[in-house]
Image: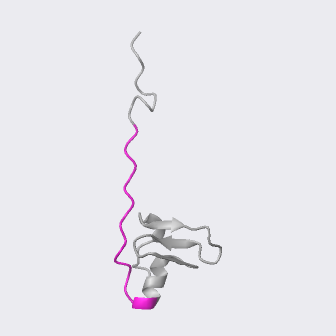
Amino acid sequence: MSSSPRCRACRYYYITWDRQRPYGCRKLGFKAAVEPALVVWRVSGHRCLAFAPKSSPPPESPAAAGEITPES
């Protein structure tokens, strides 16, 4: 399963409140005791095709980072 995508990097992955099945996939609509990609691998023998990488956060603006100072 080394070529399978990591669920934690997928936009559809989430942590549930269910102690028996703490990992979920919103795209495929199920919860599991292990990472959903591992369940897909075990059941189908193929890597998860629903994987979609999380979008990266927008870059912080220079003003918010404190790099730009107001003119006096």
Q: Residue furthest right?
A: 19
Residue 17 appears in which quarter of the rendering?
Answer: bottom right
The range drawn in magenta is 43-60
Q: Position of residue 69 (x, y in %)?
A: 42, 20
The residue nearer to you, when weighing 50 against 65, is: 50
Residue 46 lies in the magenta stretch? yes
Is 54 rendered above or below residue 31?
above
Is 63 rendered above or below residue 50?
above
The residue nearer to you, when weighing 12 against 56, is: 12
Q: Quadrant of the N terminus?
A: bottom left
Q: Main secondary structure of the magenta part?
A: loop
Residue at the location (43% across, 83% down)? 40
Residue 46 appears in which quarter of the rendering?
Answer: bottom left
The residue nearer to you, when weighing 61 against 28, is: 28
Q: Position of residue 6 (x, y in %)?
A: 45, 71
Residue at the location (37% across, 45% down)? 58
Residue 3 lies in the magenta stretch? no
Residue at the location (46% across, 28% down)? 66
The residue nearer to you, when weighing 15 against 58, is: 15
Residue at the location (59% across, 72% down)? 22
Q: Position of residue 16 (x, y in %)?
A: 57, 68
Looking at the rendered structure, the number of numbered marks drawn on it comes to 0
Q: Position of residue 55 (x, y in %)?
A: 37, 56
Q: Quadrant of the C terminus?
A: top left
